[in-house]
Amino acid sequence: MNISNVHRSTVSLIIGVVLAAGAVAPVMAGAQQDDRQEHKREHKQEQVQAAAQRAAQARDGREQAQRRNEEAAQRQAQVQQARQARDASMRDAARERAMRQDAQREAAQRRDAAVRDRQAQAQAASRAAAQARVEQARARQARVAQERAAQDRARDAQRREQDVRNARIAAAQRDSRQREDRERDARADAVRDRVHRQQDQERNRQQQIDRQRVSRQEQQRRIARQQQQVQQYRRYLDQRQHQEQRRAIELQRERRMAQYRYQQQYYQRMRAQRQRMLASRYDYDRDPYYYTPDSYRYSYAGNWYQTNRYGADQLRQAVNDGYAEGIRAGRADRQDGWRADYRNAFAYQDADYGYNGYYVSQSDYAYYFRQGFRRGYDDGYYARDQYGRYDDNGDASILQAILATILNLQPLG
């Protein structure tokens, strides 16, 4: 197909369309005119209906407004009536409150008046009671003063009577003490005279005994026994140090410091005694103990023993040394506030101070040491001098009468 043919077909088609439109246009124009008229009629009807609706709505609005006005008037009248009723009720309530307040004020005034009356009465009663108490107190003070004065006079009289009695008692006691002192001095003089006579007799007897000698065989036997005894005693001294340490620890644990200090002093004296014993050179042949015959006998624990005057002097030393150590131990326990118990003292258990291993056995020395210790402990603990006395140097020694009783030395022959 060529382009010219296409063009011709297109032109033919356009021309046909235009011709058809020309034929249809009159018909369409008539139809449109009818539609416009119909529309106008419908519009007019709608306007009429709208006007009728507006008129009906206006009537309804006027009726509703009238009803609202009537209802508002009714409500306003009801509100007015309620307000008037409320105002009347409030006025009544106010009148009632005012009446109640007036009644309450009157009641309060009456109560206040009654309270004031009671207070006035109470104050008057209180003043009267206070005045009565003051008067009673004054009366009491007057009675107390009178009683005190009477008591003072009675005490003064009793004191004067007691002074008189005390003076009489003191005079009687002074006379009694003087009489006792004279009797004690007389007894002491008699004892001293008897002791002096006994000592003179003993000295004469000892001189006679000293002129005698035991056999050489007896002397050697004594020396051998003594050497064995000294060796045993030295071994005992070596073993005793452990006991001293244990005892010191025990006293420190018990806080018995005064007893601890005394025990340390006792140990020092024992160590010095041991050093002197080890350093000394002993000459058995020159010692008169070994060739002097026995001149005394003594007993304890049911057994009898014999010794000469050197052994007797050792036993006397044991009692005196025990007494002196007992005083020190008793004072220490008293200072510590400890109970009296001489058996618990180490020196009493040891019973060895002053012993050098010679003349008498350790058991004999210990027995008589403890006899003196017990009495010295009592004098030291109770701060008295019942069994002994002090010399000018402050050294304690047991009384001769007590010493003679303890030893009870009986001459032989």
Image: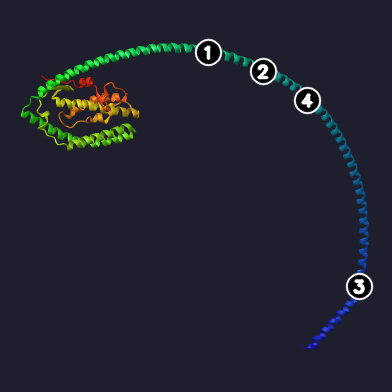
Separation of residues labelled 1 and 3 (CA atoms): 165 Å
Left/right of residue 35 with respect to residue 142 in the rendered view: right
Q: Would you name the residue on which mark 4 appears?
A: 105
Q: Would you name the residue on which mark 2 appears?
A: 127
For the residue marked with disc 1, what is the amino acid?
Answer: Ala
N-terminal of the pair, mark 2 or mark 3, is 3
Quadrant including the N terminus: bottom right
The percent coordinates of residue 97 (x first, y second) are: 80, 28
Q: Residue at x 93, y 49 (%)?
A: 59
Q: Residue at x 90, y 40 (%)?
A: 73
Mark nearest the camera among 4 and 3 is 4
For the residue marked with disc 2, what is the amino acid?
Answer: Arg
N-terminal of the pair, mark 1 or mark 2, is 2
N-terminal of the pair, mark 2 or mark 4, is 4
Separation of residues labelled 4 and 1 (CA atoms): 64 Å
Which picture quadrant has residue 210? Answer: top left
The percent coordinates of residue 117 (x first, y second) are: 73, 19
Q: Does dot 3 land on a helix, a strand or a loop?
A: helix
Q: Would you name the residue on which mark 3 appears?
A: 27
> Could you tell me if the residues under marks 2 and 4 are in contact, i.e. CB atoms within 8 Å?
no
Q: Would you name the residue on which mark 1 appears?
A: 149
